[in-house]
Image: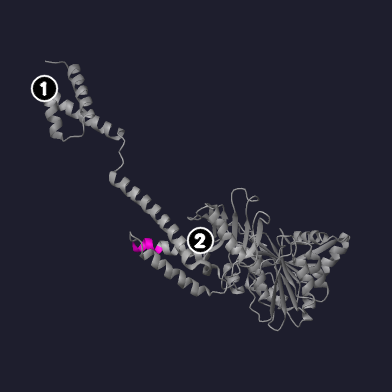
Amino acid sequence: MSTLADRLAAARQDARHMADRPPAGSGDASADTAGSVDAESQETGAAAATAGKRRAIPATTPTPDATTTSRLTLAAQQGDRIEELKSSVHVELLKQLGPHLYDADMDQNELDQRVRAVLGDVLGSQDRPLSSSDRARVTQEISDDILGYGPIEPFLRDPDVSEIMVNGFNNIWLEKSGRLTAADAHFADEAHLRRTIDKIVSRIGRRVDEASPMVDARLPDGSRVNAVVPPLSIDGSALTIRKFATDPLTVHDLIRFGSLSPRTADFLDACVRGRLNVIVSGSTGAGKTTTLNVLSSFIPDDERIVTIEDAAELQLKQEHVVRLESRPSNIEGKGAVTIRDLVKNSLRMRPDRIIVGEVRDSSALDMLQAMNTGHDGSICTLHSNGPRDTLARMETMVLMAGMDLPVRAIREQVASAVDLIVHQTRFKDGTRRITHITEVERMEGDVITLQDIFLWDNTAGFDSEGRTLGRLRSTGLRPKFLEKMQYANVTVDPMLFATDRS
């Protein structure tokens, strides 16, 4: 009779044999084991073989399923076929419609109908018919490319998207609810992106090329467009579109969003009707233009308003509005009309109010002159970090005019012209809030004194999701310009400045 060591050695050998074989039923394993050892060894060997199988199965690498591989291959072929089909249909559309696609006199609805009719004919004549979903996809993508702005067209239609940023043809980012997210879309190549940029800027008479590689433009709905192309943009053309709602935001919308409180809305309404000169300040993307639109809505309908902008984007609802837009130089470097030129010219147009979309250069001097020469009630925006910095930037831009003016004289002009600064901030959670409503008082020595009427109180901090819990509170101080507002027959309820109300 064999020893225990011999039986264990035989069991280990059987276990190795079973691990090397393909998986088989338990009956087969028992039969194989029975041919080599006695009854006692059979039980030990079967147990060892089972353990060997359990160890061996995880060690094997599963081979790809043939069905899955086949499906992936078919999907790739289908995608390639759709791309080829889009290219051929695009070419056929250009052949059939030709110059009609870029005919400025053709109605957009008529052009849309003709493009879709030709699309239907071309797709219907294909040898290999498309499924209904693929047909709808191809039709929509080609329509967006020809009638719209290619892969970014769906985002322009999406009301939740506030900004579109294209960093090269294959890198598109979106801003939704104040947060940046990567978009699942891309242009075909750099040439495709450049064609889209050219389509946007050419519609308003602008151009972009190596000689003029930066351009500010606008879409028909007023959305702001900025484009930078190589050689300035190293990694491909960069396109930034800041969308504006078809229906502009009202003061009630800003109150609902928490950008300002009902009390501050009533106060700003009275300030605009009282013909105070207002500067809306803040960083990029803080919502200055939206606030400027809301403040402009407080202007009475019986006043003549002249707006001056780099790219016309203000959406005023009054009937008596004259809109002016600056113009860059032509390819020969001539013909430029600056914001400063337009501000000077607006003084000859009998304005009741002058609204400048953004003061960023020597036009600040002419804006101050306008405010100081009887054009009260003017409003403009300016980039800055706070109310005090707003005045410093205004001084700097006045010095850019080339006038050898002493700083004290400039500050006296600023203190005399500007009545109110409305400063806006964009918080990390993406929300935009008015954080300062500050009165510009007078000169004390060489310093302009400021007085905060409403100030953002952030002592409550932030919630668990990073949203700010602060709010705009009254400081309890009454502004000195209330007397000036009375000359315009506008009075303010003193309780607006009480500190015990929310």
In the figure, residue 402 lies in which quadrant?
Answer: bottom right
**What is the number of the mark on residue 150?**
2
Question: Contact, CB < 8 Å: mark 1 with mark 2?
Answer: no
**Magenta region, residue range:** 131-136
**Of tags 1 and 2, which is closer to the observer?**
2
In the structure shown, which secondary structural element does the residue marked by tag 2 occupy? helix
Residue 180 in view of the camera = no
Going by the image, does 26 lie left or right of 240?
Answer: left
> At 12% from the left edge and 24% from the top edge, which residue is drawn?
40
Q: Which residue is mark 1?
A: 38
Screen quadrant of the N terminus: top left
> At 56% from the left edge and 60% from the top edge, which residue is drawn?
196
Q: Residues within 10 Å of mark 1 (few under 14, many from 20)?
A: few
Q: Kindly report the secondary structure that dominates the magenta region of the rendered protein.
A: helix
Relative to 391, residue 24 above or below: above
Residue 175 in view of the camera = yes
Q: Position of residue 315 (x, y in %)?
A: 63, 73
Q: Earlier in the sequence, mark 1 or mark 2?
A: 1
Residue type of the residue flagged with mark 2: Gly
Q: Position of residue 202 (x, y in %)?
A: 61, 64
User: Looking at the image, which is closer to me, 489 or 164?
Assistant: 164
**What is the number of the mark on residue 13?**
none
Residue type of the residue flagged with mark 1: Asp
> At 66% from the left edge and 81% from the top edge, which residue is drawn?
319
In the structure shown, which secondary structural element does the residue marked by tag 1 occupy? loop
Going by the image, does 346 lie left or right of 58?
Answer: right
Relative to 266, residue 289 above or below: above
User: Looking at the image, which is closer to me, 416 or 44?
Assistant: 416
Going by the image, does 407 lie left or right of 229?
Answer: right
C-alpha span from label 1 to label 2: 78 Å
366 magenta-colored: no
Screen quadrant of the C terminus: bottom right
